Image: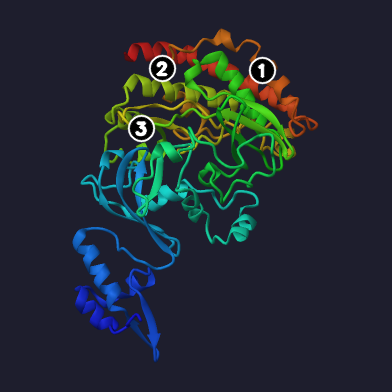
């Protein structure tokens, strides 16, 4: 029978910490406690376990029902020791680090020590956000309190990177046996559609899909892993992705973008794209690169970001080429949601080389969010992100134009309109004509800007 023989004061003396720290350890369940005659008593067993863990420089090896031990893996590489406690707001603690070079960007100090807040922020971004439609009911049915606890149900496996949690009790478990890039996962057939969240809580990459819109991973008839992304009140955003793909085909190289098409589901149209990663690559969002810029001197946010990426080994011309393509295309499409997580880089897990990721996630564009009043007022304004607050400022950042050929935009507006005419929402009275005129204006703005920018860029070189 477990003995609770230590008071908080004696526990503090035994561990050499303050009473306040003992209270924190009790609250986080790193010390096992109970109330006896109205006073807190702590088990000597848990005090001994915590003290030993501190000496070894590892997280507490708690044995309570809410916590479990893992090794954080990056494909076949061991990154560090992990304790995952589902009872905590910040469930992940990292102890010994085995391979700092293959840890997620930003979760370790420059000296290789774990940063718990950043580690848990990284984990939360690999979890379904609370804004996903129907998620609260799904969590209730699974008996899960928060969505960040879902990924442990499938070892944290994803199709956006190669990180996973290998249970401490299963050291022989192999990446080849579990990864979704090569192995099947449940509810993966597009022909057996149930609902958007049917794979959540099971052995599925849907447990680690980021973003507010309904999403689901499927495997097509030739084995491609494809992401389906639906819509909410409108049905325009899937078609916006198809319009963006049409633009990218005209201006960019095939490797510069993820191609989308629109497929029908029982819940309406969905945008579909093939996964652009393989089983030894991870997507690194721009936010992870940006935070490493620190005090790097630069002329602007754009310049600092490009310099930071270059300092990490990405060719400077490749970064600026990719960012210029993104800015030009986003201005044409009136994309107002190019935030720091939906563009970035791909890292090879084996070689650790970084390269720009293809453009993806351009659905929040083409004025789909404009009200009838704004349409009647011919309000085509939008805020381009993430480097500027106005179209002029965004275009002023562009410093690569060798790829741009204005003649390739001939006929694009009509092609875009023909795609959007399949959307019930986009064809509501007045909307399609509003979008057509807005696209014409944006195309003209970009062409005029490139005529000014081209000579300036050449002079700068």
Closer to the chain start, of discs 3 and 1, is 3
Q: Which residue is mark 1?
A: 413
Closer to the chain start, of discs 2 and 3, is 3
How has the structure been colored for display? rainbow
User: Residue at the location (35% across, 47% down)?
Assistant: 72
Residue 269 x %, y %: 71, 33
Closer to the chain start, of discs 2 and 1, is 2
User: Residue at the location (80% across, 31% down)?
Assistant: 429
Residue 431 x %, y %: 74, 30
Q: CA separation, marks 3 and 1? A: 32 Å
Choose top left, top right, bottom left or bottom right for residue 413.
Answer: top right
User: Residue at the location (27% across, 38% down)?
Assistant: 101
Question: Between residues 335 and 361, which one lies in front from this camera angle?
Answer: 361
- Does 229 sit left or right of 148 as displayed? right
Q: Which residue is mark 2?
A: 400
Question: Between residues 383 and 222, which one lies in front from this camera angle?
Answer: 222
* Image quadrant containing the N terminus: bottom left
- Classify 393 as above or below 452: below
Q: Which residue is mark 3?
A: 305
Q: CA separation, marks 2 and 1? A: 24 Å
Residue 218 x %, y %: 60, 35
User: Residue at the location (39% across, 85% down)?
Assistant: 35
Few, some or many residues within 10 Å of mark 2 (<14, 14–19, 20+): many
- Does 27 sit left or right of 266 as displayed? left
- Classify 449 as above or below 132: above
Few, some or many residues within 10 Å of mark 3 (<14, 14–19, 20+): many
Choose top left, top right, bottom left or bottom right for residue 411.
Answer: top right
Few, some or many residues within 10 Å of mark 1 (<14, 14–19, 20+): some
Residue 379 x %, y %: 66, 33
- Helix, strand or loop for disc 3: helix
- Helix, strand or loop for disc 2: loop
């Amino acid at each position: 029978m477990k003995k609770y023989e230590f008071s908080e004061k004696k526990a503090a003396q035994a561990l050499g910490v303050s009473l306040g720290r003992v209270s924190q350890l009790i609250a986080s369940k790193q010390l096992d406690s109970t109330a006896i005659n109205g006073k807190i008593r702590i088990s000597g067993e848990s005090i001994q376990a915590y003290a030993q863990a501190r000496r070894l420089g590892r997280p507490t090896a708690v044995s309570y029902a809410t916590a479990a031990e893992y090794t954080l893996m990056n494909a076949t590489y061991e990154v560090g020791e992990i304790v995952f406690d589902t009872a905590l707001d910040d469930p992940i603690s990292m102890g010994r680090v085995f391979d700092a070079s293959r840890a997620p960007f930003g979760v370790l100090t420059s000296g290789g020590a774990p940063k718990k807040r950043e580690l848990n922020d990284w984990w939360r971004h690999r979890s379904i956000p609370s804004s996903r439609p129907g998620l609260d009911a799904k969590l209730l049915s699974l008996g899960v309190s928060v969505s960040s606890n879902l990924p442990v149900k499938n070892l944290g496996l994803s199709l956006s990177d190669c990180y996973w949690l290998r249970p401490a009790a299963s050291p022989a478990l192999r990446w080849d046996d579990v990864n979704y890039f090569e192995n099947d996962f449940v509810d993966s057939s597009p022909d057996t559609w149930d609902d958007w969240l049917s794979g959540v809580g099971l052995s599925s990459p849907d447990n680690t899909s980021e973003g507010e819109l309904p999403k689901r991973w499927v495997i097509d008839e030739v084995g491609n892993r494809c992401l389906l992304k639906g819509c909410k009140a409108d049905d325009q955003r899937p078609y916006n992705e198809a319009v963006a793909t049409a633009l990218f085909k005209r201006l960019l190289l095939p490797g510069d973008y993820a191609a989308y098409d629109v497929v029908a589901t029982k819940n309406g149209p969905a945008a579909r794209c093939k996964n652009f990663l393989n089983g030894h690559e991870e997507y690194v969002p721009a936010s992870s690169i940006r935070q490493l810029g620190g005090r790097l001197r630069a002329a602007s946010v754009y310049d600092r970001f490009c310099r930071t990426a270059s300092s990490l080994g990405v060719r400077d011309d490749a970064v600026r080429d990719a960012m210029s393509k993104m800015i030009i295309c986003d201005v044409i499409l009136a994309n107002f949601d190019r935030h720091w997580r939906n563009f970035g880089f791909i890292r090879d897990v084996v070689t650790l080389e970084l390269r720009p990721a293809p453009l993806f996630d351009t659905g929040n564009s083409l004025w789909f969010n404009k009200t009838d009043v704004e349409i009647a007022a011919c309000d085509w304004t939008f805020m381009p992100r993430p480097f500027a607050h106005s179209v002029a400022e965004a275009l002023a950042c562009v410093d690569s134009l060798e790829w741009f050929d204005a003649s390739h935009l001939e006929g694009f507006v009509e092609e875009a309109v023909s795609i959007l005419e399949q959307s019930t929402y986009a064809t509501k009275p007045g909307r399609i004509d509003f979008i057509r005129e807005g696209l014409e204006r944006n195309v003209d703005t970009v062409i005029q800007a490139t005529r000014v920018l081209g000579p300036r860029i050449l002079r700068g070189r």
